[in-house]
Image (cartoon, rainbow, N blue to C red):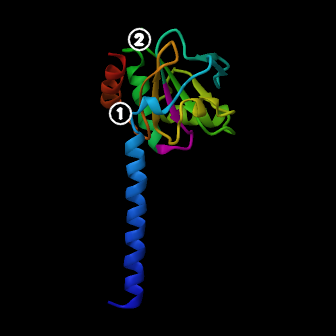
Amino acid sequence: MTRSRRVYTLAALCLAAVLVAVLAVIALNRGNPASTVAGGGPVEITSVDGEEVTVPSDRPTVLYFMASWCATCIPQATAMDELEEQYADRVWFVAVDVTPENTKIEVDRFRTAAGAPEHPYVVDETGQLTKRYGITSLDSTVVVAPDGEVLDRADGTPMKAEALRAFLDGALS
């Protein structure tokens, strides 16, 4: 084996080890509501349409953390739109754009790509929702009870309608 081939092989092994370590950390933190302390009172934030949104609300709130530039976030935003009517009396859906500098125009482009869902879209300009719920990756979903307790979470897991339905049914049971 030539010297350059050994260097490339060693570099590939190191990269693989780092990737395995990162995936292990993500897997260990996934679905662990105890790792996030919601704490504090309700957060009031204005949607891009000017609607006042309070989290948590009077019923469980499904927070979907996304970004308007995130292509993998579109399927779950579409799934939330599909399930909104079915869960209308049980939960409240809110999409949270984690890019503080995003504008209504950018969020509306994303919303159009997702099928123009009706649920509120907010831009987490100060990062207060992202920090409160310990969000570290896009495509994260947190279900928050009216008392602020985190009922369930899925970090970095984009879900289509059937997977989101199963997740919500488990969180709300």
Q: Position of residue 28 (x, y in %)?
A: 38, 43
> Magenta segment range?
63-71
Tell me the kind of residue under disc 2: Arg
Tell me the kind of residue under disc 1: Lys
Depicted 118 relative to depicted 5: above or below:
above
Q: Position of residue 144 (x, y in %)?
A: 48, 20
Q: Nearer the viewer, residue 73 or 169?
A: 169
Is 133 situated left or right of 169 in this image? right
Q: Is residue 66 magenta?
A: yes
Residue of label 2: 90
Residue of label 1: 160
Is 169 situated left or right of 55 in this image? left
Distance between mark 1 and mark 2 Cα atoms = 19 Å
Mark 1 or mark 2: whose residue is earlier in sequence: 2
Q: Position of residue 127 (x, y in %)?
A: 64, 34
Q: Quadrant of residue 173?
A: top left
Q: Secondary structure at mark 2?
A: loop
